[in-house]
Amino acid sequence: MSLGVTELVLILIIVFVIFGAGKLPNVMKDVGKSIKNLKDGIKESDSKDVPIKKTKKNNTK
């Protein structure tokens, strides 16, 4: 499933009606910042992954 041109135009019209022309640049700026923060968080969590150390099992009976 992918969005076609018609669907994208319809979504943009709905967003324009909901937020209006004055707030739209601020909304898009906030969306961009959110996406950037999400990507940075994903990169940061990937770099913090540390392999688990294997330990010897105790064979106690």
Image (cartoon, grey):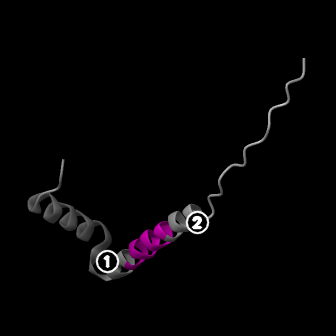
Q: Quadrant of residue 49?
A: bottom right
- Nearest the viewer among 22 and 32 is 32
Residue at 31 percent of width and 77 percent of height: 24
Percent across and percent down for residue 15 are 26, 66
The tag on residue 47 is 2
Of badges 2 and 1, the one in the foreground is 2
Residue at 24 percent of width and 71 percent of height: 16
Left or right of residue 55: residue 48: left
Left or right of residue 18: residue 10: left
- Asked if 12 appears above or below 2 in the picture, the reply is below
Percent across and percent down for residue 12 are 21, 67
Q: Which residues are magenta?
A: 29-39
Is the stretch drawn in magenta largely helix, strand or loop? helix
Mark 2: few/some/many CA within 10 Å (<14, 14-19, 20+): few
Q: Quadrant of residue 14?
A: bottom left
- Asked if 52 appears above or below 60 in the picture, the reply is below
Q: Is residue 35 magenta?
A: yes
- Nearest the viewer among 61 and 35 is 61
Return the residue at label 1.
24
Q: Earlier in the sequence, mark 2 or mark 1?
A: 1
Left or right of residue 35: residue 49: right
Task: Give the tally of numbered discs.
Answer: 2
Percent across and percent down for residue 6 are 9, 60
- Nearest the viewer among 21 and 56 is 56
Amino acid identity at mark 1 = Leu
